[in-house]
Image (cartoon, helix red, strand yellow):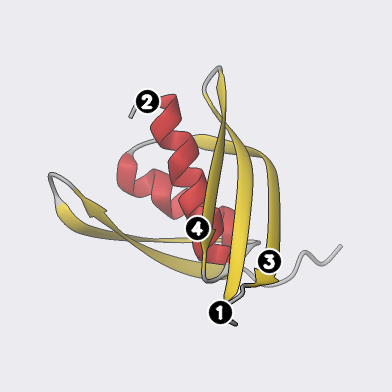
Amino acid sequence: MDRGTDVAVRIELLHEVRGKVADLASGQGGVETAFRAIDQILGTNGRLESLNVTGRLGDNGEWRASACVSVRFGSVEMPGWCTASDALTASCGAYLDALGRAVGD
């Protein structure tokens, strides 16, 4: 079975101690690969349990994507939410929101 071509994702995060930090990851899907890059930067190991992304055109005519995730960090499963201008940014924001909840941000 052909699983397709790997994608590469580069993520930049602004870390409060280390400043701007970037990392690359590769995998089968853009969203989960982006989550892997986030984990590599932050030294975490989350497992995506669920992801729901919706989008709509706002009253001002701008597209908004909303993402809701459930991520397992060890034995703790946490939800996360984010709204952004595109699905990938919203998904990454939701993942970071779940991570912040898991570590008691």
Q: Which residue is tagged 2?
A: 103
Q: Which residue sits at x=61%, y=75%?
A: 59
Residue 100 lies, in percent from the top left, at 39, 34
In this view, the residue farthest toward the front is 59
Dot in front, 3 or 1: 1
Marks 1 and 4, how far apart at CA: 29 Å
**What amino acid is found at the position of numbered circle 3 in the picture?**
Gly
Note whether residue 33 is visible: no
Q: Which residue is tagged 4?
A: 34
Q: Which residue sits at x=32%, y=48%?
A: 41
- Secondary structure beneath label 2: loop
**What amino acid is found at the position of numbered circle 1 in the picture?**
Asn
Q: Which residue is tagged 3?
A: 55
Picture quadrant where residue 60 is located: bottom right
Residue 19 lies, in percent from the top left, at 14, 55
**Could you say which is closer to the camera, residue 22 or residue 55?**
55
Dot in front, 1 or 4: 1
Left/right placement of residue 7 relative to residue 99 reads right
Tell me if label 4 and label 3 are in contact, CB under 8 Å.
Answer: no
Image vertical order of residue 23 relative to residue 69, above or below = below
Q: Which residue is tagged 1?
A: 60
Quadrant (top left/top right/bottom left/bottom right) for the N terminus: bottom right
Name the N-terminal-most of marks 4 and 3.
Answer: 4
Q: Which residue sits at x=45%, y=41%?
A: 97
For disc 1, the neighbor class at 10 Å (few under 14, some 14 to 19, many from 20) is few
Marks 4 and 3, how far apart at CA: 19 Å
Marks 3 and 1, how far apart at CA: 14 Å
Marks 1 and 2, how far apart at CA: 36 Å
- Secondary structure beneath label 4: helix
Name the N-terminal-most of marks 3 and 1.
Answer: 3
**What amino acid is found at the position of numbered circle 2 in the picture?**
Val
**What amino acid is found at the position of numbered circle 4 in the picture?**
Ala
